[in-house]
Image (cartoon, rainbow, N blue to C red):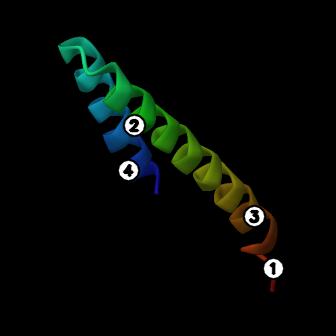
Amino acid sequence: MLHYAIVFLIIALVAGLLGFFGIAGIAAEIAKVLFIIFLILFVVSLVFGRRR
């Protein structure tokens, strides 16, 4: 999931440099949402993952 967030961030940066600001905004929002989901799942796995 973190990989996809980084990919969308790179797409947003490249689109912003080329002047496609609509696509850059959408890609940045997708990257932000994916990163937040990654953080939530990471914290949940830390809390519940190591129980015996």
Mark 4–mark 1 Cα distance, whole angstroms, equals 27 Å
Which residue is rendered at x = 64% and y = 46% of the image? 36
Farthest residue to the left: give it: 18
Q: Earlier in the sequence, mark 4 or mark 1?
A: 4
Which residue is rendered at x = 62% and y = 54% of the image? 37
Residue 3: give its label.
Answer: 4
Circle 2 or circle 1, nearest the eye? 2
Mark 2–mark 1 Cα distance, whole angstroms, equals 37 Å
Q: Earlier in the sequence, mark 2 or mark 3?
A: 2
The residue pinned by badge 3 equals 44
Contact, CB < 8 Å: mark 2 with mark 1? no
Q: Quadrant of residue 50?
A: bottom right
Q: Amino acid at mark 3?
A: Val
Circle 2 or circle 4, nearest the eye? 2
> What element does badge 2 sit on?
helix
Mark 3–mark 4 Cα distance, whole angstroms, equals 19 Å
Contact, CB < 8 Å: mark 1 with mark 3? no
Vertical side of 44 occupied by 29: above or below: above
Q: Percent x, y for residue 47?
A: 81, 65
Mark 2–mark 4 Cα distance, whole angstroms, equals 14 Å
Contact, CB < 8 Å: mark 4 with mark 1? no
Vertical side of 21 occupied by 1: above or below: below
The residue pinned by badge 1 equals 51
Q: Percent x, y for residue 30?
A: 48, 43
Residue 11 as seen in the image, left or right of residue 42: left
Q: Amino acid at mark 2?
A: Ala
Circle 4 or circle 1, nearest the eye? 4
The residue pinned by badge 2 equals 27
Circle 2 or circle 3, nearest the eye? 2
Q: Amino acid at mark 1?
A: Arg
Contact, CB < 8 Å: mark 2 with mark 3? no
